[in-house]
Image (cartoon, coloured by chain):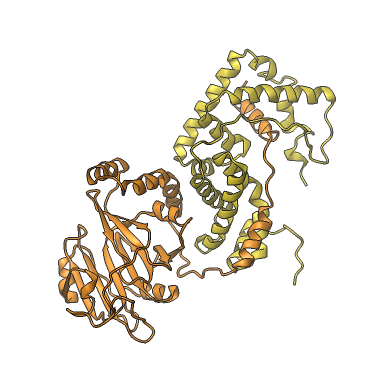
Amino acid sequence: MSDRELEHALRDLGDHLDQPATPPLAEQVAARLREAPERRPVPSRRRLPGRWRWQRLAIAGLAAAVLAAAVLVLSPGTREAVADLLGLRGIRIQIGEPRPTSTTPPSTEAGGLGASLGLGRRTTLDEARRSVKFPVRLPTAAGFDRPDAVYVDPDQPADGRVDFVYRARPGLPASSYTEAGLLITQFRATVDLAYIKKLSGVSEVEFLRVNGGNAFWFSQPHELVFVDRHGSYQQERARLAGSTLIWEQGDVTYRLEGQISRDEAVRIAESMR
Amino acid sequence: MEGRPLDTEDDDQLVARAQRGEVHAYERLVRRHQDLAFRTAYLVTRSRSDAEDAAQEGFVKAWHALDRFRPGAPFRPWLLAIVANEARNRIRSARRQDSLALRAVEDRPSGDAAPSPEAAALASERRKTLLAAVNRLSESDREMLACRYFMELSEAETASVLGCRRGTVKSRTSRALGRLRAILAEQGIAQSLWPATEGVGGLKQRSDGPQSKEGGGE
């Protein structure tokens, strides 16, 4: 029996196997789509070189994601061991349960705008650029090209982070906790896509593209968990309790948080230079 | 309205219309691929309800992700990857591992000439023998053969459904075939059921003969 014959016999067998009947998926899906017909407009219609990598990551990373989620309840030593085991490199973001942020009343903040957000040290844009090991980008969108406050933390996470704080104003509502209306964070990291994919089953996350990179829109506040390159976890609060856009550009991850619409968030994100 | 006859549009055209928000076009796309999507999900979950759930969710997610779909790219592998991912999210720890079975009643595509009772009985015997051998394979071998031969997925599609690399698909397929062949040989039936050369083997005839199911289309 040649290979071809055997293969042919198998194909023939496949045609005669007992299978559960296919449910009326077309009707079910169409009904669901008509219920919520809102198609999400694309911020960017570019070719996606990473698409297949995504899919593979999502599938292959599923077990890892489950493990990684479980890791959170383990001891720090175990976490690192498991992180090693999973080959976690660089920094990843995982998105956990939303949690109330700070309890600071929304009055004038002692120490200035954003001081209660725990962002590190207040500084100037130039000094922030010198303090971190990645190129700092600034929005060019009108009204966002001059942050009201700049914070830098040169050490956490590993290559540092920079935060831009924008004061609340008409069209940019204050969060319930601070006078800040918008927060843009940048740091060197990669997004743990597998985990986000998994999460998308239980939580509202939209997959978008911003400037050709992966982007995720969370309409609800989320807590983030970073894993730095040593495999240790750092929690990251949702500081403004607003919606969040996370996107990647090169090896830098950006996070924009505030009570703004998705399209506005994407517009600001795409203007970052 | 141009009043296009149903289903003369190819996937590309339907995808393009679906990308513009036409639910109806997408519904047709779903109908076209729902069997394979469901079978894929069933292969992964081994549960009818989980497979239905995964396939439905996969189609809905694919709709919402259509904007990221590159026009002109093949739709099916992309879709299957999404569905398989949904299905994998639903794998339960105690996944059923039941044997495959043949359909009790053979349905034949209309237009096919009915084979003689003898030929039909012979073909049915062969399938039973082959199936018994397939059922003795490991779960992972069976999955691989199911993807490649029962569902006739491409290597790339198989890789995304089973969550392995494409090169792995090739080597695992060939190992699974080897083991299947060994089981058949062990049963001492390989020769008699599948004559190596130009025998009366219905299997061989089936591919080029008038009873070919594939050839009986439209």
Q: Residue at x 29, y 47 (%)?
A: A88
Q: Residue at x 63, y 23 (%)?
A: B132
For chain A, give the colour. Answer: orange
> Which quadrant of the figure has residue B208?
top right
- Nearest the camera: B34 or B194? B34
Left/right placement of residue B217 relative to residue A8 reads right
Q: Residue at x 44, y 40 (%)?
A: B165
- Nearest the camera: B101 or A14? B101
> Which quadrant of the figure has residue A103?
bottom left
Task: Output the letter for the chain in yellow.
Answer: B
- Nearest the camera: A272 or A246? A246
> Which quadrant of the figure has residue B153?
top right
Image coords of residue B158 (percent x, y)? 53, 41
- Nearest the camera: A235 or A267? A235
Q: Is residue A206 above or below residue A67?
A: below
Q: Is residue A172 above or below residue A200?
A: below
Image coords of residue B51 (percent x, y)? 59, 45
Residue that extends furthest to the bottom in the rendered view of this protein = A170
Q: Is residue B24 above or below residue B46?
A: below
The N terminus of chain B appears in which quarter of the rendering? bottom right
Image coords of residue A222 (percent x, y)? 37, 63
Is residue A273 among what the camera can see?
no
Left/right placement of residue B21 relative to residue A115 reads right
Q: Is residue A169 above or below residue B191?
A: below
Image coords of residue B151 (percent x, y)? 62, 39
Left/right placement of residue A127 relative to residue B173 reads left
